[in-house]
Image (spheres, coloured by chain):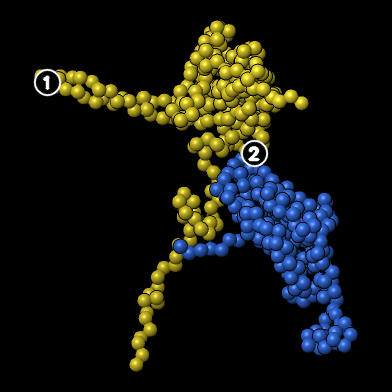
Chain colours: A blue, B yellow
Protein backbone atom coordinates (compact mmCIF):
# COMPACT_ATOMS: atom_id res chain seq x y z
CA UNK A 1 0.00 0.00 0.00
CA UNK A 2 1.54 3.20 -1.11
CA UNK A 3 1.63 5.88 1.52
CA UNK A 4 0.38 9.25 0.47
CA UNK A 5 1.88 12.31 2.04
CA UNK A 6 -0.49 13.79 4.62
CA UNK A 7 0.25 17.35 3.50
CA UNK A 8 -0.39 16.48 -0.13
CA UNK A 9 -3.64 14.86 0.76
CA UNK A 10 -4.96 17.89 2.63
CA UNK A 11 -3.80 20.10 -0.20
CA UNK A 12 -5.63 17.94 -2.71
CA UNK A 13 -8.72 17.96 -0.50
CA UNK A 14 -8.63 21.72 -0.46
CA UNK A 15 -8.66 21.66 -4.26
CA UNK A 16 -11.66 19.35 -4.32
CA UNK A 17 -9.86 16.06 -4.91
CA UNK A 18 -10.50 13.49 -2.26
CA UNK A 19 -7.84 10.84 -2.06
CA UNK A 20 -8.17 7.94 0.31
CA UNK A 21 -6.90 4.44 0.85
CA UNK A 22 -8.67 1.16 1.14
CA UNK A 23 -7.73 1.00 4.81
CA UNK A 24 -9.10 4.45 5.60
CA UNK A 25 -12.33 3.78 3.76
CA UNK A 26 -12.77 0.40 5.40
CA UNK A 27 -12.06 1.67 8.91
CA UNK A 28 -14.21 4.76 8.34
CA UNK A 29 -17.11 2.53 7.53
CA UNK A 30 -16.46 0.17 10.44
CA UNK A 31 -16.02 2.80 13.10
CA UNK A 32 -19.22 4.62 12.19
CA UNK A 33 -21.39 1.55 12.36
CA UNK A 34 -20.60 -0.27 15.58
CA UNK A 35 -23.58 -2.37 16.55
CA UNK A 36 -23.59 -3.23 20.25
CA UNK A 37 -24.95 -6.45 21.65
CA UNK A 38 -28.19 -5.77 23.47
CA UNK A 39 -27.76 -6.98 26.98
CA UNK A 40 -27.29 -5.44 30.39
CA UNK A 41 -26.36 -6.90 33.73
CA UNK A 42 -27.06 -4.31 36.42
CA UNK A 43 -27.51 -0.60 37.05
CA UNK A 44 -24.87 0.31 34.43
CA UNK A 45 -27.34 -1.00 31.87
CA UNK A 46 -29.73 1.81 32.86
CA UNK A 47 -27.05 4.33 31.97
CA UNK A 48 -26.43 2.44 28.74
CA UNK A 49 -30.15 2.69 27.93
CA UNK A 50 -30.01 6.42 28.68
CA UNK A 51 -27.06 6.69 26.29
CA UNK A 52 -29.11 5.02 23.59
CA UNK A 53 -32.13 7.24 24.18
CA UNK A 54 -32.69 10.60 22.56
CA UNK A 55 -31.02 12.88 25.12
CA UNK A 56 -27.53 11.39 24.77
CA UNK A 57 -28.26 9.61 21.49
CA UNK A 58 -25.53 7.12 20.67
CA UNK A 59 -26.97 7.16 17.14
CA UNK A 60 -24.82 10.24 16.54
CA UNK A 61 -21.86 7.87 16.60
CA UNK A 62 -23.44 5.09 14.60
CA UNK A 63 -24.05 2.76 17.52
CA UNK A 64 -27.80 2.87 17.85
CA UNK A 65 -28.55 -0.56 16.44
CA UNK A 66 -28.53 -2.74 19.53
CA UNK A 67 -28.65 -6.28 18.22
CA UNK A 68 -30.43 -9.03 20.12
CA UNK A 69 -28.19 -11.65 18.49
CA UNK A 70 -24.43 -11.96 19.02
CA UNK A 71 -24.06 -13.00 15.37
CA UNK A 72 -24.95 -9.48 14.26
CA UNK A 73 -23.09 -7.53 16.93
CA UNK A 74 -19.68 -5.86 16.73
CA UNK A 75 -19.39 -4.60 20.27
CA UNK A 76 -20.09 -6.11 23.65
CA UNK A 77 -20.77 -3.51 26.35
CA UNK A 78 -20.34 -5.40 29.61
CA UNK A 79 -22.65 -3.10 31.56
CA UNK A 80 -22.82 -4.21 35.15
CA UNK A 81 -21.85 -6.76 37.75
CA UNK A 82 -20.67 -10.05 36.31
CA UNK A 83 -21.57 -12.77 38.77
CA UNK A 84 -19.66 -16.01 38.65
CA UNK A 85 -22.85 -17.74 37.61
CA UNK A 86 -23.20 -15.35 34.65
CA UNK A 87 -19.55 -15.29 33.53
CA UNK A 88 -19.64 -18.48 31.38
CA UNK A 89 -22.64 -17.11 29.50
CA UNK A 90 -20.84 -13.82 28.82
CA UNK A 91 -17.82 -15.65 27.43
CA UNK A 92 -20.09 -17.87 25.36
CA UNK A 93 -21.89 -14.84 23.91
CA UNK A 94 -18.55 -13.24 23.11
CA UNK A 95 -17.43 -16.43 21.35
CA UNK A 96 -20.56 -16.35 19.22
CA UNK A 97 -19.84 -12.84 17.96
CA UNK A 98 -18.22 -12.57 14.56
CA UNK A 99 -14.81 -10.94 14.10
CA UNK A 100 -13.95 -8.08 14.27
CA UNK A 101 -15.40 -7.73 17.75
CA UNK A 102 -14.72 -5.37 20.60
CA UNK A 103 -15.45 -5.20 24.32
CA UNK A 104 -16.15 -2.19 26.53
CA UNK A 105 -16.00 -2.96 30.26
CA UNK A 106 -18.45 -0.45 31.66
CA UNK A 107 -18.29 0.47 35.34
CA UNK A 108 -16.36 -0.61 38.40
CA UNK A 109 -17.95 -4.07 38.57
CA UNK A 110 -17.11 -5.07 35.00
CA UNK A 111 -13.55 -3.80 35.49
CA UNK A 112 -12.71 -5.34 38.86
CA UNK A 113 -15.80 -6.52 40.72
CA UNK A 114 -16.31 -3.03 42.10
CA UNK A 115 -17.98 -2.78 45.49
CA UNK A 116 -18.64 -6.53 45.39
CA UNK A 117 -14.99 -7.42 44.80
CA UNK A 118 -14.57 -9.24 48.10
CA UNK A 119 -17.78 -11.21 47.71
CA UNK A 120 -17.93 -14.90 46.97
CA UNK A 121 -20.14 -14.67 43.90
CA UNK A 122 -18.84 -11.77 41.81
CA UNK A 123 -16.18 -12.09 39.13
CA UNK A 124 -13.24 -9.75 39.73
CA UNK A 125 -13.39 -8.21 36.28
CA UNK A 126 -14.50 -9.60 32.95
CA UNK A 127 -10.93 -9.17 31.63
CA UNK A 128 -10.08 -12.44 33.38
CA UNK A 129 -11.73 -14.32 30.54
CA UNK A 130 -12.08 -12.05 27.48
CA UNK A 131 -9.87 -9.23 26.15
CA UNK A 132 -11.23 -5.76 26.93
CA UNK A 133 -10.62 -2.84 24.56
CA UNK A 134 -11.87 0.11 26.60
CA UNK A 135 -12.42 0.35 30.35
CA UNK A 136 -14.78 2.99 31.80
CA UNK A 137 -14.53 3.66 35.52
CA UNK A 138 -17.56 4.87 37.43
CA UNK A 139 -20.35 3.49 39.54
CA UNK A 140 -22.21 3.72 37.27
CA UNK A 141 -20.45 5.82 34.61
CA UNK A 142 -22.42 8.71 33.20
CA UNK A 143 -23.72 8.43 29.64
CA UNK A 144 -21.04 10.95 28.63
CA UNK A 145 -18.42 8.50 29.88
CA UNK A 146 -19.89 5.73 27.76
CA UNK A 147 -19.89 8.04 24.76
CA UNK A 148 -16.27 8.89 25.50
CA UNK A 149 -15.45 5.18 25.61
CA UNK A 150 -17.30 4.76 22.35
CA UNK A 151 -15.21 7.50 20.76
CA UNK A 152 -12.05 5.94 22.13
CA UNK A 153 -13.08 2.68 20.53
CA UNK A 154 -13.72 4.50 17.23
CA UNK A 155 -10.22 5.95 17.45
CA UNK A 156 -8.82 2.51 18.11
CA UNK A 157 -10.67 1.03 15.12
CA UNK A 158 -9.52 3.90 12.92
CA UNK A 159 -5.89 3.17 13.75
CA UNK A 160 -6.05 -0.54 12.99
CA UNK A 161 -3.90 -1.64 10.04
CA UNK A 162 -5.22 -4.03 7.46
CA UNK A 163 -1.87 -5.23 6.12
CA UNK A 164 1.67 -5.61 7.27
CA UNK A 165 3.22 -7.12 10.34
CA UNK A 166 1.36 -4.83 12.72
CA UNK A 167 -2.04 -5.49 11.25
CA UNK A 168 -5.09 -5.82 13.43
CA UNK A 169 -5.35 -8.87 15.67
CA UNK A 170 -8.54 -10.13 14.09
CA UNK A 171 -6.82 -10.41 10.71
CA UNK A 172 -4.12 -12.70 12.04
CA UNK A 173 -5.19 -16.30 11.58
CA UNK A 174 -3.22 -17.56 14.58
CA UNK A 175 -4.89 -15.15 17.01
CA UNK A 176 -7.80 -16.68 18.92
CA UNK A 177 -11.28 -15.33 18.34
CA UNK A 178 -12.87 -17.76 20.75
CA UNK A 179 -11.95 -18.07 24.39
CA UNK A 180 -12.37 -21.02 26.74
CA UNK A 181 -15.62 -20.92 28.66
CA UNK A 182 -15.04 -21.37 32.40
CA UNK A 183 -16.77 -24.28 34.06
CA UNK A 184 -18.79 -24.28 37.25
CA UNK A 185 -16.52 -25.82 39.86
CA UNK A 186 -17.17 -27.12 43.34
CA UNK A 187 -15.89 -23.96 45.01
CA UNK A 188 -15.24 -21.45 42.22
CA UNK A 189 -15.13 -21.09 38.46
CA UNK A 190 -12.54 -23.32 36.81
CA UNK A 191 -10.15 -21.94 35.75
CA UNK A 192 -10.22 -18.71 37.76
CA UNK A 193 -8.77 -16.75 34.84
CA UNK A 194 -7.54 -17.31 31.33
CA UNK A 195 -3.76 -16.80 31.57
CA UNK A 196 -3.54 -15.91 27.86
CA UNK A 197 -5.85 -12.96 28.44
CA UNK A 198 -5.40 -12.00 32.07
CA UNK A 199 -1.87 -11.04 33.02
CA UNK A 200 -1.97 -8.70 35.99
CA UNK A 201 1.11 -6.53 36.45
CA UNK A 202 3.55 -7.89 39.00
CA UNK A 203 4.13 -5.41 41.80
CA UNK A 204 7.24 -5.79 43.93
CA UNK A 205 6.35 -5.12 47.54
CA UNK B 1 -65.61 7.55 47.36
CA UNK B 2 -65.77 7.49 51.14
CA UNK B 3 -62.85 8.42 53.30
CA UNK B 4 -61.11 5.63 55.13
CA UNK B 5 -62.06 5.77 58.78
CA UNK B 6 -59.50 4.05 60.94
CA UNK B 7 -61.53 4.51 64.11
CA UNK B 8 -64.67 2.88 62.73
CA UNK B 9 -63.01 0.05 60.82
CA UNK B 10 -63.17 -2.88 63.20
CA UNK B 11 -60.55 -4.84 61.24
CA UNK B 12 -57.90 -2.69 62.93
CA UNK B 13 -57.22 -4.00 66.35
CA UNK B 14 -54.20 -4.57 68.48
CA UNK B 15 -52.75 -8.01 68.22
CA UNK B 16 -52.70 -10.06 71.39
CA UNK B 17 -49.40 -10.27 73.25
CA UNK B 18 -46.79 -12.88 72.50
CA UNK B 19 -47.41 -14.59 75.84
CA UNK B 20 -51.08 -14.93 74.98
CA UNK B 21 -50.23 -16.33 71.55
CA UNK B 22 -47.85 -18.80 73.20
CA UNK B 23 -50.45 -20.09 75.63
CA UNK B 24 -53.08 -20.34 72.92
CA UNK B 25 -50.71 -22.35 70.69
CA UNK B 26 -49.94 -24.67 73.59
CA UNK B 27 -53.65 -25.21 74.06
CA UNK B 28 -54.30 -25.80 70.37
CA UNK B 29 -51.27 -27.95 69.58
CA UNK B 30 -50.78 -30.52 72.33
CA UNK B 31 -47.17 -31.26 73.15
CA UNK B 32 -45.81 -28.14 71.46
CA UNK B 33 -42.71 -26.78 73.14
CA UNK B 34 -42.50 -23.03 72.71
CA UNK B 35 -40.01 -20.61 74.14
CA UNK B 36 -40.07 -16.84 73.96
CA UNK B 37 -36.72 -15.48 72.78
CA UNK B 38 -35.95 -12.14 74.39
CA UNK B 39 -34.49 -9.29 72.40
CA UNK B 40 -32.11 -6.92 74.10
CA UNK B 41 -32.13 -4.35 71.32
CA UNK B 42 -34.17 -1.10 71.59
CA UNK B 43 -36.92 -2.63 69.46
CA UNK B 44 -37.62 -5.25 72.16
CA UNK B 45 -39.03 -7.42 69.40
CA UNK B 46 -39.43 -10.83 70.97
CA UNK B 47 -39.94 -14.00 69.01
CA UNK B 48 -41.28 -17.52 69.38
CA UNK B 49 -38.83 -20.41 69.29
CA UNK B 50 -40.83 -23.47 68.30
CA UNK B 51 -39.86 -27.11 68.28
CA UNK B 52 -39.33 -28.79 64.92
CA UNK B 53 -41.63 -31.71 65.61
CA UNK B 54 -44.78 -29.61 65.99
CA UNK B 55 -43.63 -26.77 63.75
CA UNK B 56 -45.99 -27.43 60.86
CA UNK B 57 -48.98 -27.82 63.17
CA UNK B 58 -48.08 -24.58 64.94
CA UNK B 59 -47.66 -22.79 61.64
CA UNK B 60 -51.01 -24.03 60.41
CA UNK B 61 -52.62 -22.81 63.64
CA UNK B 62 -51.04 -19.37 63.23
CA UNK B 63 -52.40 -19.17 59.72
CA UNK B 64 -55.97 -20.42 60.22
CA UNK B 65 -56.73 -19.13 63.72
CA UNK B 66 -59.44 -16.48 63.21
CA UNK B 67 -58.02 -14.09 65.79
CA UNK B 68 -54.46 -14.24 64.46
CA UNK B 69 -54.96 -15.13 60.78
CA UNK B 70 -51.29 -14.66 59.89
CA UNK B 71 -51.83 -15.16 56.18
CA UNK B 72 -48.68 -13.41 54.93
CA UNK B 73 -45.14 -14.69 55.38
CA UNK B 74 -43.15 -11.59 54.58
CA UNK B 75 -39.60 -12.69 55.17
CA UNK B 76 -37.60 -15.83 55.85
CA UNK B 77 -33.97 -15.62 56.80
CA UNK B 78 -31.21 -17.80 58.15
CA UNK B 79 -28.74 -17.31 60.98
CA UNK B 80 -25.56 -19.24 61.63
CA UNK B 81 -24.66 -19.63 65.29
CA UNK B 82 -21.17 -20.96 65.85
CA UNK B 83 -20.12 -23.00 68.88
CA UNK B 84 -19.76 -20.54 71.70
CA UNK B 85 -18.75 -20.42 75.32
CA UNK B 86 -20.89 -18.41 77.73
CA UNK B 87 -19.13 -17.28 80.90
CA UNK B 88 -21.27 -16.91 83.96
CA UNK B 89 -20.07 -15.23 87.11
CA UNK B 90 -21.64 -16.02 90.47
CA UNK B 91 -20.72 -14.72 93.88
CA UNK B 92 -20.27 -17.51 96.35
CA UNK B 93 -19.70 -17.08 100.06
CA UNK B 94 -17.08 -19.42 101.41
CA UNK B 95 -15.08 -19.69 104.58
CA UNK B 96 -11.43 -18.79 104.09
CA UNK B 97 -9.23 -19.05 107.21
CA UNK B 98 -12.25 -18.94 109.43
CA UNK B 99 -13.54 -15.75 107.80
CA UNK B 100 -16.49 -15.53 105.50
CA UNK B 101 -15.49 -14.05 102.14
CA UNK B 102 -17.21 -13.48 98.88
CA UNK B 103 -15.52 -15.19 95.99
CA UNK B 104 -16.51 -14.64 92.38
CA UNK B 105 -16.75 -17.95 90.58
CA UNK B 106 -16.86 -18.15 86.83
CA UNK B 107 -18.42 -21.12 85.15
CA UNK B 108 -18.14 -21.77 81.48
CA UNK B 109 -20.99 -23.23 79.52
CA UNK B 110 -20.33 -24.60 76.05
CA UNK B 111 -23.23 -24.07 73.68
CA UNK B 112 -22.89 -26.10 70.49
CA UNK B 113 -23.59 -24.27 67.26
CA UNK B 114 -26.75 -24.55 65.25
CA UNK B 115 -28.48 -22.97 62.29
CA UNK B 116 -31.66 -21.00 62.65
CA UNK B 117 -34.51 -20.05 60.32
CA UNK B 118 -36.55 -16.98 61.17
CA UNK B 119 -40.01 -16.31 59.73
CA UNK B 120 -41.76 -12.94 59.88
CA UNK B 121 -45.51 -13.38 59.73
CA UNK B 122 -48.15 -10.71 59.20
CA UNK B 123 -51.90 -10.68 58.79
CA UNK B 124 -53.34 -9.02 55.72
CA UNK B 125 -56.87 -9.62 57.03
CA UNK B 126 -56.39 -7.98 60.40
CA UNK B 127 -53.48 -5.75 59.36
CA UNK B 128 -51.31 -6.72 62.27
CA UNK B 129 -47.94 -8.29 62.81
CA UNK B 130 -45.23 -9.28 62.81
CA UNK B 131 -45.15 -12.50 64.73
CA UNK B 132 -41.60 -13.80 64.53
CA UNK B 133 -41.11 -17.54 64.56
CA UNK B 134 -37.74 -19.26 64.89
CA UNK B 135 -36.66 -22.83 64.38
CA UNK B 136 -33.27 -24.29 65.20
CA UNK B 137 -31.42 -27.24 63.72
CA UNK B 138 -29.83 -29.89 65.90
CA UNK B 139 -26.28 -28.95 64.90
CA UNK B 140 -24.31 -27.38 62.06
CA UNK B 141 -23.03 -30.54 60.34
CA UNK B 142 -25.34 -33.55 60.05
CA UNK B 143 -28.66 -32.54 61.50
CA UNK B 144 -29.30 -29.39 59.48
CA UNK B 145 -32.91 -30.31 58.83
CA UNK B 146 -36.03 -28.28 59.46
CA UNK B 147 -39.64 -28.70 58.38
CA UNK B 148 -40.60 -26.54 55.43
CA UNK B 149 -43.32 -23.89 55.74
CA UNK B 150 -43.80 -23.65 51.98
CA UNK B 151 -46.96 -25.83 52.08
CA UNK B 152 -48.46 -23.26 54.47
CA UNK B 153 -47.06 -20.01 53.08
CA UNK B 154 -46.24 -20.20 49.37
CA UNK B 155 -44.10 -17.07 49.65
CA UNK B 156 -41.57 -19.05 51.70
CA UNK B 157 -40.63 -21.18 48.70
CA UNK B 158 -37.85 -19.06 47.16
CA UNK B 159 -36.62 -17.79 50.52
CA UNK B 160 -36.25 -21.29 51.90
CA UNK B 161 -34.37 -22.19 48.74
CA UNK B 162 -32.10 -19.23 49.36
CA UNK B 163 -31.45 -20.36 52.93
CA UNK B 164 -30.72 -23.85 51.64
CA UNK B 165 -28.32 -22.34 49.10
CA UNK B 166 -26.43 -20.03 51.44
CA UNK B 167 -26.72 -21.72 54.86
CA UNK B 168 -27.32 -25.37 54.00
CA UNK B 169 -30.53 -25.96 55.92
CA UNK B 170 -32.52 -28.79 54.33
CA UNK B 171 -36.23 -28.01 54.45
CA UNK B 172 -38.21 -31.22 54.57
CA UNK B 173 -41.47 -31.01 52.68
CA UNK B 174 -40.25 -28.27 50.33
CA UNK B 175 -41.57 -29.01 46.84
CA UNK B 176 -38.47 -27.93 44.90
CA UNK B 177 -35.41 -27.62 47.09
CA UNK B 178 -32.57 -26.58 44.77
CA UNK B 179 -29.87 -23.93 44.90
CA UNK B 180 -31.30 -20.62 43.75
CA UNK B 181 -28.36 -18.18 43.57
CA UNK B 182 -25.23 -20.29 43.23
CA UNK B 183 -24.78 -22.93 40.57
CA UNK B 184 -25.84 -26.53 41.15
CA UNK B 185 -22.26 -27.85 41.22
CA UNK B 186 -21.32 -25.49 44.07
CA UNK B 187 -20.70 -27.30 47.35
CA UNK B 188 -20.09 -24.60 49.96
CA UNK B 189 -22.52 -22.52 51.98
CA UNK B 190 -21.22 -18.96 51.63
CA UNK B 191 -23.22 -17.28 54.40
CA UNK B 192 -21.93 -19.60 57.08
CA UNK B 193 -19.49 -17.88 59.36
CA UNK B 194 -16.74 -20.45 58.83
CA UNK B 195 -16.93 -20.16 55.03
CA UNK B 196 -13.60 -19.54 53.34
CA UNK B 197 -13.93 -17.90 49.95
CA UNK B 198 -11.60 -18.99 47.12
CA UNK B 199 -8.21 -17.30 47.20
CA UNK B 200 -8.28 -15.05 44.14
CA UNK B 201 -6.40 -12.10 45.57
CA UNK B 202 -3.51 -12.19 43.12
CA UNK B 203 -4.27 -8.71 41.77
CA UNK B 204 -5.20 -6.18 44.44
CA UNK B 205 -3.86 -2.75 43.47
CA UNK B 206 -4.94 -0.98 46.66
CA UNK B 207 -5.35 -3.59 49.40
CA UNK B 208 -6.11 -2.74 52.99
CA UNK B 209 -7.22 -4.47 56.20
CA UNK B 210 -8.41 -8.04 55.65
CA UNK B 211 -7.78 -7.88 51.91
CA UNK B 212 -4.19 -6.78 52.54
CA UNK B 213 -3.56 -9.90 54.61
CA UNK B 214 -4.90 -12.10 51.83
CA UNK B 215 -3.09 -10.19 49.09
CA UNK B 216 0.23 -10.58 50.93
CA UNK B 217 0.16 -14.29 50.17
CA UNK B 218 0.59 -13.40 46.49
CA UNK B 219 3.21 -10.67 46.81
CA UNK B 220 6.37 -10.89 44.79
CA UNK B 221 9.34 -10.19 47.06
CA UNK B 222 11.64 -7.32 46.16
CA UNK B 223 14.86 -8.40 44.47
CA UNK B 224 17.87 -8.73 46.77
CA UNK B 225 19.84 -5.57 47.28
CA UNK B 226 23.09 -5.78 45.31
CA UNK B 227 24.84 -2.73 46.82
CA UNK B 228 24.37 -0.49 43.79
CA UNK B 229 21.75 1.67 45.48
CA UNK B 230 24.27 2.56 48.19
CA UNK B 231 26.54 4.34 45.69
CA UNK B 232 26.08 8.08 45.97
CA UNK B 233 27.23 10.43 43.28
CA UNK B 234 30.25 12.30 44.64
CA UNK B 235 29.94 16.02 45.10
CA UNK B 236 31.58 18.02 42.35
CA UNK B 237 33.59 21.17 42.82
B166 w.r.t. B89: above or below: below
In which quarter of the view is residue A171 placed? bottom right
> Which of the pair B194/B89 is nearer the observer?
B89
| Residue at mark 2: chain | B
> Callout 2: helix, strand or loop?
loop
* Up/down of B191 relative to A18, above or below: above
- Asked whether the residues under the numbered discs 1 and 2 touch, taking CB atoms below 8 Å apart as contact, a structural biologist would say no
Residue found 49% across the figure and 29% down from its top: B43
Mark 1, residues whose alpha carbon is within 10 Å: few (<14), some, or many (≥20)? few
Q: Which residue is mark 1?
A: B99
Residue B227 % position (x, y): 38, 75
Query: Same chain for the residues at labels 1 and 2, yes or no?
Result: yes
Q: Is residue A16 left or right of residue A144?
A: right
Q: Is residue A9 left or right of residue B153?
A: right
In the rendered image, is residue A66 in sight?
A: yes
> In this rendering, is residue B175 above or below B193?
above
Q: Which residue bears the numbered disc 2?
A: B182
Residue A35 in view of the camera:
no
Numbered badge on residue B209: none
Q: Nearer the viewer, residue A64 or A132?
A: A64
Residue B85 in percent (x, y) is at 38, 29
Task: Using the numbered discs, state the Cα–Cα distance from disc 1 to disc 2 in whole angstroms.
Answer: 66 Å
The residue tagged with tag 1: helix, strand or loop? strand
Residue drawn at x 24%, y 26% is: B104
The quarter of the rendered structure image containing the C terminus of chain B is bottom left
x then y, percent, for residue A148: 70, 65
- The picture places residue A51, in percent across and down from the top left corner, at 75, 57
Q: Residue at the spot x=67%, y=30% of the render?
A: B158
In the image: residue A112, left or right of residue B49 = right
Amino acid sequence: MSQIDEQLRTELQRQGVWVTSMQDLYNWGRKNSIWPLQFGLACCAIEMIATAASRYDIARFGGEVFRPSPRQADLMIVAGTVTKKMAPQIVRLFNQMADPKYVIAMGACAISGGPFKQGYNVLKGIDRYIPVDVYIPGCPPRPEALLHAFMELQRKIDEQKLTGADKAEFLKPDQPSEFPVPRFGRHDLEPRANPNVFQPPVLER
Amino acid sequence: MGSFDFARDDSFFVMESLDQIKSRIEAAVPGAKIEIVQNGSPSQQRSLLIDNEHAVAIARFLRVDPALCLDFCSNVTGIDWLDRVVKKTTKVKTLVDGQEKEIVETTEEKIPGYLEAVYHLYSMTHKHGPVIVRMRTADRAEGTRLPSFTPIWRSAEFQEREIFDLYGIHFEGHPDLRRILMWDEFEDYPMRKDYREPDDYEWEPTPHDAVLEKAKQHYTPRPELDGAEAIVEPLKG
